[in-house]
Image (cartoon, rainbow, N blue to C red):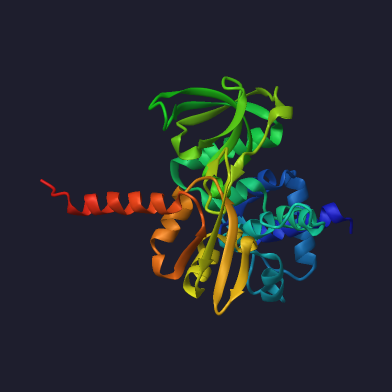
Amino acid sequence: MDQPKLERLLRLMKLLTANTTYTVDQLAERLSMSRRTVYRYIDTFREAGFVIKKTGDCIRLDKASPHFRDISQLVHFTEEEAVILKSAIESIDDTNLLKQNLKRKLYSVYDNKTLADTVVRGKNAPNIRRLIEAIEERRQTVLHGYRSAHGAQVRDRRVEPFAFTTNYVNVWCYDPEDGRSKLFKTARIGSVSLGGAWEHAAEHREGFIDAFRMHGDAPQRIRLELGLLACNLLCEEYPLAERDLTPSGHGRWMLDTQVAGYVGVGRFVAGLLDDIRIVDAPGLQSYLDAYFARYAHTATTPTN
């Protein structure tokens, strides 16, 4: 059996063993197949000994099928597992030769739109799907009713989207109006419509984003000494920071990294002052002092 056909069979098996049920038309649409091809593949499963269960117009592989448990565990990821796998693969250094193979194998079963649906819920999901489509088709978009955090304006923005940050929180776009690439927060987009082809692909550049998921134009180097608690929490909450950690002995670790500013790292350090020592981070202590001053003022301000 050729590899493309095998991949299509695996994708179909994933859908037929998922918690959600699908009609033949829905299966054909999701897999970009004809109804005839879907039926032919279903016949292949039936000939292999699987029991095909039909409820109304919906079809699935019956759990009573021989070897169902073994095969479904082999090829089926839950939606949450798929997202974790994608995150893990994307965190691998781009120079690693296995990264692209891992991505191709995962995406042969889960496409980007499916992955997005596992992360983004509610009214923002359609916007994410249109942005994914625009990136895949290299098209411009109009971000209708974008609410800018800086100018407190609500207006349409014509941009060229080309990449997302973690969990689709922001989208990198080239903004022809400003002549540069920058981040747009997806939650601030009213709606998205597709436009013509990219015109500035050579100028698409992702800016610097630190391990604390903050972005900026002027990275600053910091060095912090962490105890066991702080080290564990850092790796759990900000997995990318782990690559910048080295053991310094006696149950302590050194974090030597670059940050886009002190907001992200400052919030992390503020909650773990007893377990973190600032070694080299000009301006971080001043940020923390101001942070706690604001907190104290808020806590003591009477409310009506």
Give the residue furthest to the bottom.
Answer: 250
Q: Residue drawn 73% across and 55% down?
A: 93
Left of 12 or right of it: where is 125? left
Give the residue furthest to the left.
Answer: 304
Q: Nearer the viewer, residue 27 or 203?
A: 203
Image position of 224 with respect to 34: above or below: below
Q: Which quadrant, please, contains the N terminus?
A: bottom right
Q: Is residue 54 visible?
A: no
Residue 220 rendering spot, x and y as whole percentages = 56, 47
Residue 158 rendering spot, x and y as whole percentages = 56, 23
Image label count: 0
Image position of 185 with respect to 42: above or below: above
Q: Quadrant of residue 244?
A: bottom right
Left of 14 or right of it: where is 189? left
Residue 201 rendering spot, x and y as whole percentages = 72, 28
Q: Residue drawn 51% across and 48% down?
A: 120
Q: Residue drawn 78% across and 49% down?
A: 37
Q: Is residue 293 visible?
A: yes
Q: Nearer the viewer, residue 145 or 171?
A: 171
Q: Nearer the viewer, residue 107 or 282?
A: 282
Q: Nearer the viewer, residue 102 or 62?
A: 102
Residue 88 rendering spot, x and y as whole percentages = 65, 60
Give the residue furthest to the top.
Answer: 177
Q: Quadrant of residue 182?
A: top right
